[in-house]
Every structure is written in C-alpha cells, then in structure tokens.
Amino acid sequence: MPDDLVQLFESDDGQLFVPPKKQVAATADDRLTASFQQIVDFVEKNDRLPELEAVDISEAGLAARLNSIRADAAKSEALQPIDSLGLLETPEAPESIDELFSDDTFGLFNGVGDDILRVKNVPVVQRASPEDIATRKRADNFDTFRAGFADTQASLRDRTAKLVRFTSVTQLKAGAYFVAGGQMLYVADIGEEKMVHGRMKSRIRAIYENGTESNLYLRSLSSQLYYDGYCVVTSDYNGELQLDAADTIAGHIYVLRSRNQDEKITTIKNLHKIGFTSTTVAERIKDAENDPTYLMAGVEVVDSYIITGDYNTQKVEHFIHRIFADVKVDLKIIDRSGQEYAPSEWYSVPLIAIEQAVNMLQNGDITEYKYDKDLEQLILRNA
C-alpha cells in the first residue's frame, strides 16, 4: 500500500473509511419493557396510578397501556422481573384489617386514625320490585300547581333561577322543582318512611308539567335524576349541599349497572361497577357509551353515596375494592378503534352487600367483617 494511503488511514480522517456499525433493531421485548418503564416512572413520580379518565392524554394512554398489559398474562409474566412496584400483581382479599391497612403502597391511609371516614346521607338501594314501579295518572287539582310551573319557567327565562345537575338524593325536598327526561316536575310531598320487605322506603308525590302525577319511591325518582336530571335553583345558588357546618364533600361513591346487552356481560350475576369521583356522578359517566371503562355502553346509576370528611379521597374507594377483591370480574372490551382494554372496578356482588359495606363504614363496624362470596354478604371475621 502506498505510504500516502497508509498515512491517510492512520490520520484522524481515517475514521471516514470505517464502516458504520449496524444498529440493532429493538425487539418486541425491548419495546414492551420500555413502554412498561414509562408507567413505572409515572407512578414513582406521582405516587399514584395513571387514570384512564385523566384530562392529560399521555396519562390516559399510560392507564390504557397498563390495563392492556394486565389483561395479557404472557406480557405480565415477562415483565415480572422489573415490576418493582407490584403494578401487575392481582390483589388478594385481606385476611385481616391489619393487613388491609399495612398494604398501603400509595399512602392512602396516611394520617388516618380510628375514625377512618364519615359517610353522610346514605341512600337506600333501589330495587326493581313491583312496588318500585309507579304509573302516572291525571293529577288531582292540577290547577293549584299550574301557576307554580309558569312562575318557575318565567324565572328560568329571566335568569333569576337556573338549572344545576342533580348530584345527591339530599336535593330531593318537598316544594322543589326538577327536570327529568326534559320534563319539569314538582315534588309536592315526601311521605314518611315505612318498612317495605325489610327496608325503609318513602313515597314521593311528583306533579309533572303535562298535568300528570306519580306516586313513586324516592329512590326511583333519584335514579332517574342521577341519569339526566336537573334541579331548579335560584341564580345565586353556589352548588353546596345542606350539610353540617363542619362537613366538606370529598366526592361520591357510585354504583353502576351496565346497559351493554352482550350475552357475555348480561349473564354475569349481580355485575356492578363501584367507583369514586370527586366531581359529580353525571359528569363522570357522561360519555359512557364511548368509554371502555363503562363497557362501551350506557350505564344506570343504581346508587350514589356522598362522602364527607378530611382525608385522602382515594381511600374510601380503595377500601371497598379490597373488601370485594374476591369477586372482582376480569373483563375484556374492544373500543371503537379496535383496541382491547381490561376495565376495572366491576364486581359480581349484590346491591345489598354493597350497601351493607357502606353502612358498616359509616358506623365503624367494617373492621370486624369480611365478605363471604358464597353467602353473598359480610360476615364476622372470627366467625
């Protein structure tokens, strides 16, 4: 080789003649690991799981990705070595109340003493029994109500009154006006509670603007209003419910029933979604038909519980989910773009057991009970 070429190869410019190293293409395992690491980084930074309903699109994407990984046993197994936070572990029902509080990865119970929460205004669960079905008839003495409807409509037009979303059964009071299914109604009277099939229920006399009336259960009307109802309030209404002076509303625990008619869903006994929202239930479920979280279908609000108190708002939902962990239903749903999701928070549990759990949270007895899936009720832990 000529000396001048040797000198060229040995010079700094000689690197120009070295063929570049071929980049190794990322494998599917590498991509899976990298995508899961992004979820881990999010949890470590925010001390919580990403939420599918988050406003931030990137966070919602991480939540959808985590659900997809959890739904795939092979992917979950492959990621076990790097799942340092246990994000892919399936929670088991706690054996004791001590275990429930000790397994607190995200600090949900930090600073919580014996008075773990207070639940106010717990409503009665709606039952689809014949007694719940009330037919409308022509209203007696409708002329005595006609002027009230006219005045209320006038107040809405001149904006001395306004409509706000119905969010709580406590808003149902005699003398108040509401809009359900686009029709205005007036609550003329709320009867005394009576024992009906072992449960306390009260009837409402509802007068409708079209001249009809109905004598229906309070819980039946509240369920209609939860779905698409409004309250008529004065223009200076600030949105606060009439609670005790020391109470602050942390949010609502809601119980939903899916309207999805797929046989794989309709055949699941007592299928209910138990969730928590710091906004209103109506706001949370407004796009249920397009959300895999709600099985890509409309939902029926079966119950809503106002949660008050000064504590981490996630702990109530977390507590109930742990109690019913043994009856959590593993579902898979395909969204409109063909993406597969694994919706969470759906349980095969009867309404009476959910109400039982919330009532026990209210009086503090929950620490002494566990859920028996065979008996479908909460039983004493030492039984």
Image: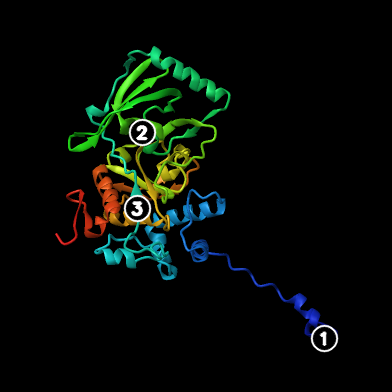
Say which residue label 2 marks. Answer: 222
Does residue 141 appear to the left or right of 288 in the view shown? left
Q: Name which residue type carries label 2.
A: Ser
Left or right: 119 as drawn, with respect to 238: left
- Label 2: few (<14), some (14–19) or many (≥20) C-alpha neighbours in 10 Å: many
Q: Nearer the viewer, mark 2 or mark 1?
A: 2
Q: How many marks?
A: 3
Residue 227 x, y percent position in the rendering: 41, 34
Report the residue marked by disc 1: 7
Looking at the rendered structure, the kind of residue marked 3 is Arg
| Residue at the outermost front position | 245
Residue 175, compared with residue 339, is above or below; it is above
Q: Considering the numbered disc 1 on the image, is that residue within a helix, a strand or a loop? A: helix
Q: Nearer the viewer, residue 115 or 1?
A: 115
- Pick whichever, 165 or 133, lies toward us: 165
Residue found at the very far left of the displayed protein: 383
Disc 2 and disc 1: Cα gap in Å?
Answer: 90 Å
Residue at x 43% of width, y 15% of height? 146
